[in-house]
Structure formats: structure tokens, C-alpha cells
Image (tube, helix red, strand yellow):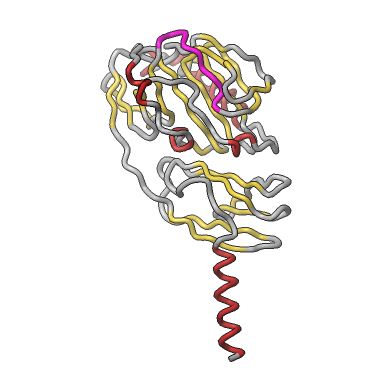
Amino acid sequence: MYRLLTALLALFQAALSSACIEFNTAVTQGALLWGQVPAGSSVYLDDEALSVSADGLVVFGFGRDTTGPSTLRVEGEQACSLELQVMSREYRIQRVEGVPQQTVTPDPEQLERIRREARLVRAARASSSQRTDFANGFQWPLAGPISGVYGSQRVYNGTPGRPHYGVDVAAPTGTPVAAPAAGVVVLAEPDLFYSGGTLIIDHGSQVSSSFLHLSKVLVPVGTRVQAGDLVGEVGATGRASGPHLDWRMNWRERRVDPQLLVPPMPQSAYNTRP
């Protein structure tokens, strides 16, 4: 009887351990996940230390091409180790014509500018704070037809480009763009080579939103914004063939899919074309 009770207790403890953290969404390529662990815990994803807030909120993400299982390890009052099976996705191919050729194959004289701007963007995304604005959820920054999706492979003027890491919403130039969640503006640039008018909002714990091709950037660096606050206007600046918003999200250096964090685009949005 003692051995049976011991075995049952071990099974019960294992069940509790496996449920020591629940996530906001499915474990899939491009997902941004967060969950609650006991305050004071240390958490690791494949031995990479994760930020844990004072009240035990932890966040991490998977990139477009993440494959195989990942191990999440929680150390502390309620220790556990979870093997996360990252679900694969299929991505579409898009062909985009009419893009200025100098932005597809930049002039060597532009390369230094491109490198300088890339460093500027990386530094903004590396901004780290203990805020947890991301955990309050996200909303669409504007309504409109979805013209491009995360993970798709783009071919510009017949030249294969890097995969697309955002969601594109088509809208006329000047359409207001709202903050999808609370945060702090960490980059506000009117004219970057590739992305044109560019805004980055830090949502805490190295979770950030980027807004590309804006015709106007309406908030300066350091501005604290709330979900729904006006932050910019749609444009076609940088490498763009028409007016639209390119909304991207990062966790650290990993690019995640914003569309996994918002409800479906209202069908009425497709009735208005730019």
C-alpha cells in the first residue's frame, strides 16, 4: 500500500509540474508566448535565461523557421521542465513589382547608410525594461485589407528577397495608425532607406512593435503611449510599391507574428480599398 501511495503521489506531483505554466497561445512558429510562474523563479528556454517580472510573468518567442522541440525549464519554488513541440507553418510566396530598383539592389554608396540605420534599429529593439504592457493584449493598429502576411517569401522585381516578417494592412496615405498596446517609443525616424518613416514601441521585456513606411511619425522618442493612441499615418515611404502599414513585432532578436496576437480583421475592413 505504501508503494502504491508513493507512486500515486509521484504521478500527482508530475502532473502539477507539467502544468506549472500555461501560455496565452499555441506553441507554433512565429508565436509570442507568455505565462505565469511563482515570483522569484528563474526560467530558461533551451538554456537561454528569460526575463521574469517581479510578479512572475515570463515571455519568449519563436522565429519563423524554428524547428524541433524546445525545452523550457523553471527553477525555484515550483520547478519543472517542459518539452515544447513547436508546430510548423506553411508560408506563401509573393511577387512584388514596381519597387524602385535602387532599393532592390542598393548603390554601394548607400550601403553605409543602410548599415548605420540597421544598427540604430537593433539598438532600439534591444531596449530592456521590466514593464509587462504586452500581457494586456494587442489590437489592430488600423483596419483595412490584409495585403501581406508574416513568413511569406517576397520576390521584388524578380529578385528573391528575405522573408516578410510583418503583417501588411493596405490603407490610403494619411490613414491614422494607433498603438496596438501600451508602451514607450524607442525609435522615431522619418526616413530610413528600406522602411521609410519608422516607429518602434517597446512593450516591455524586450517585446517591441515596429511600424514601417509611415508618411508621418507623430510621437517622439520617450513618449509613453496607451493602446489606441495615435502614433503615425500610413504612407508608402522607403521600399514600398503602394501605401500600407507594415506592422512587425520582435522578442529580442526573434521576429514574431503580430497576427497571432490580435482577433481576425473585421470583414467590414475589406470593403474599403486604398
223 in the magenta segment? no
Magenta region: 172-180
* Residue 219 placement: quadrant: top right
Report the side of 229 relative to 270 (left or right): right
Q: Residue at x 64, y 22 (%)?
A: 225
Residue 156 pos. (x, y %): 31, 21
Residue 49 vertical position relative to residue 151 in the rendered view, above or below: below
Please tell me whether residue 32 is drawn above or below residue 210 in the rendered image.
below
The N terminus lies in quadrant: bottom right
Residue nearest the viewer, comparing 112 with 237: 237
Secondary structure mainly formed by the magenta segment: loop
**Callout count:** 0
Q: Residue at x 57, y 73 (%)?
A: 12
Q: Nearer the viewer, residue 160 or 90?
A: 90
Residue 74 in the image: above or below residue 179: below
- Among all residues in the image, which is located at the extreme bottom? 1
The picture places residue 171, in percent across and down from the top left corner, at 40, 14
> Which corner quadrant holds the C terminus?
top left
Residue 269: name its quadrant.
top left
**Above or below — where is 229 with respect to 55?**
above
Would residue 231 be found to the left or right of residue 212 on screen? right
The residue positioned 59% from the left and 50% from the top of the image is 48
The x, y position of residue 144, in whole percent, is 39, 20
Q: Position of residue 140 (x, y in %)?
A: 48, 26
Q: Is residue 113 left or right of residue 148?
A: right
